[in-house]
Amino acid sequence: MRAGIVMNDGTKRQRRGDTRRRVQETALALFSEQGYERTSLREIAEALDVTKAALYYHFRAKEDILISLFEDLNRPIDELVEWARRQPPSLETKQEFLLRYSRALTDAAPLIRFMQENQAAVRELRIGGMFKDRVTALMDVLQEPGASLPDRVRCVAALITMHLGLLTLTEAEGDPESKHRAVLTVASELIAQAHHASAPPRPGRPHTDPPGTTGKPPKEPLTS
């Protein structure tokens, strides 16, 4: 066989991977532009300039494309959650988690924007349940065991700040780094408030002064 037409397994896998990514990117662009419900597999195939049968080789349904996108873009976040679970549950761990999470969100921004703009459709799809599981895993990392309701709200607000802040500030004035830093600062402050409010008093050091005391050393008695 001539060397010029030989294609090894590695080359075939790379070409399949490239085609798969093209399908994902094209489909997500159409979903975002037209809406998920109004986009058909036929339109995706036409945009790719391939036959519908060729598209079926990679994905059998629109939802399969969405799920593959979610799994691919969230793989780094899965790894980040596993990393956080192996660390001490300190404020420093949570702050580092938020920093790394903000970087991972940058790559997933197109999918998050789509999910935000197509909430009704997403709720009816498997990806809606997958996203809820993802939020639950993130909350397990960020909130303290037995956290009060206000502290749980602070953790939820931190996640919302991360998700929506990075998206809605895209068109706002300022350079991307400054906007990213502002979003991260606000989210970190919320987590710090929740962490300190939930932290138990240190042994030997009461969290508050005992009733009837000021925490100051007593004054010397007056002598006549």
Image (spheres, rainbow, N blue to C red):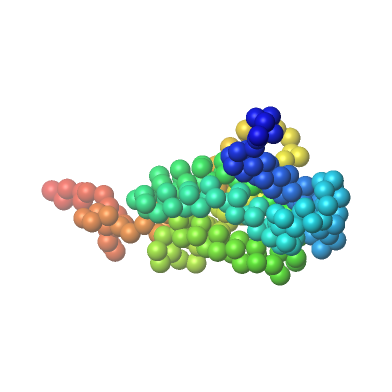
Residue at 46% x, 60% y is: 140
Q: Position of residue 4 (x, y in %)?
A: 69, 29
Q: Quadrant of the N terminus?
A: top right
Q: Is residue 123 above or below residue 50?
A: below
Q: Which is more toward the observer, 41 or 108?
A: 41
Residue at 45% x, 66% y is: 148
Farthest residue, direction left: 224
Residue at 70% x, 54% y is: 58
Q: How many marks?
A: 0
Q: Is residue 3 above or below residue 135?
A: above
Q: Which is more toward the observer, 212 or 152?
A: 152
Residue at 50% x, 60% y is: 137
Q: Which is more toward the observer, 119 or 66?
A: 66
Q: Position of residue 78 (x, y in %)?
A: 51, 53
Taking the image as drawn, is residue 158 in sight? yes
Farthest residue, direction bottom: 124
Taking the image as drawn, is residue 32 in sight? no
Q: Is residue 117 above or below residue 224?
A: below
Left or right of residue 184, residue 35 in this image: right
Quarter of the rendering containing residue 123:
bottom right
Q: Position of residue 62 (x, y in %)?
A: 75, 60
Q: Position of residue 9 (x, y in %)?
A: 59, 42
Q: Which is more toward the observer, 59 or 81?
A: 59
